[in-house]
Amino acid sequence: MKISTQTENCSYDTQYLIEEITDSAIHINLAFKKIVSVQSKRAYREQICNLSQGELSKFKWIISGCVNVDFTWYLHAVERQETDKVGDIDNITKPILDSLIGPNGVLIDDAQIRALYTYWLSHNELVEDNLLKIKISFNNDNCLEKSNLIFIQYANAICLPVNVEPTDHKQLLGALLLVKSRQRQRTAAKSIRFIGGNVDNYLVLSPWDFHRTRLNEFPSSNIYSVSSFKELCRNNGLTFLAILRLMREARGGT
């Protein structure tokens, strides 16, 4: 099995190379003798997943917004027809999708996939391996660094991903203010619904929100309730007086 990646307007280190252009893409090329499917033995599925994530872990950032994914399979057409070695296209796509997710992947959850196009072509006799070419297209404005990535569960089961260095008071305060802002938006949306209006698409819908059950690939230690995040802030010296000092500095005071 072999894997390689190419990128468009991004690299392992950054989600964009040209700041003014928000369109980026990751191309993943996989070659393997045996096709993995949902019916494959667990050890082989894990082998493919480890291969994929070993490559994708090189990316220092992760996509949080919607993506379009194209799968192009180059398979042996006769083998596909005459044997059961090559499964149905949906069965062979799912295990590969799973390998794109989590801290060692490039997606937080497969719910981010807005469009999935998967199809197969016949490769010629000069090619021994089955080949898979994956293209992930995304808006690079909706990305986060993998380092210091945490999730704050701020509204029922809804979690907000943020990059926070625990010893950086400005980042801690910024996260607190962001959570408070999102909570107020949801409260406003609820009030408007109470009088017969619906502005959820304006005030609730967000590419940055994830349901708690969609974060199973991430360590539970990286997921905070609002109260436990506030405790983290206090433990790192972000007291009320420290917040006042930061506010004064932001206003140009002394």
Image: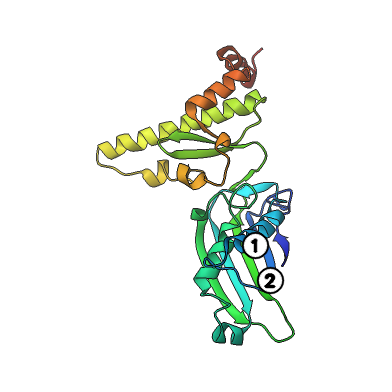
Residue 10 can be seen, yes or no: no
Which amino acid lies under the numbered mark 2 shown in the image of this protein? Phe
Give SS at disc 2: strand
Query: Which of the 4 image quadrants contains residue 204?
Result: top left
**In the rendered view, does 1 fall on the left or right side of 89?**
right
The one of 54 and 170 positioned closer to us in this rendering = 54
Which amino acid lies under the numbered mark 1 shown in the image of this protein? Ile
Using the image, tell me which numbered label, if any, was put on residue 32.
2
Q: State whether residue 161 is above or below residue 127.
A: above
The residue pinned by badge 1 equals 48
Q: Are marks 2 and 1 in contact (CB under 8 Å)?
A: yes
Number of other residues with Cα within 10 Å of mark 1, as a class: few under 14, some 14 to 19, many 20 or more: many
Which quarter of the rendering shows the C terminus? top right
Residue at left 62%, top 46%?
103
Mark-to-mark CA distance, 2 and 1: 9 Å
**In the rendered view, does 133 fall on the left or right side of 116?**
right
Residue 9: percent from left, percent from top:
70, 57
The number of numbered badges drawn on the structure is 2
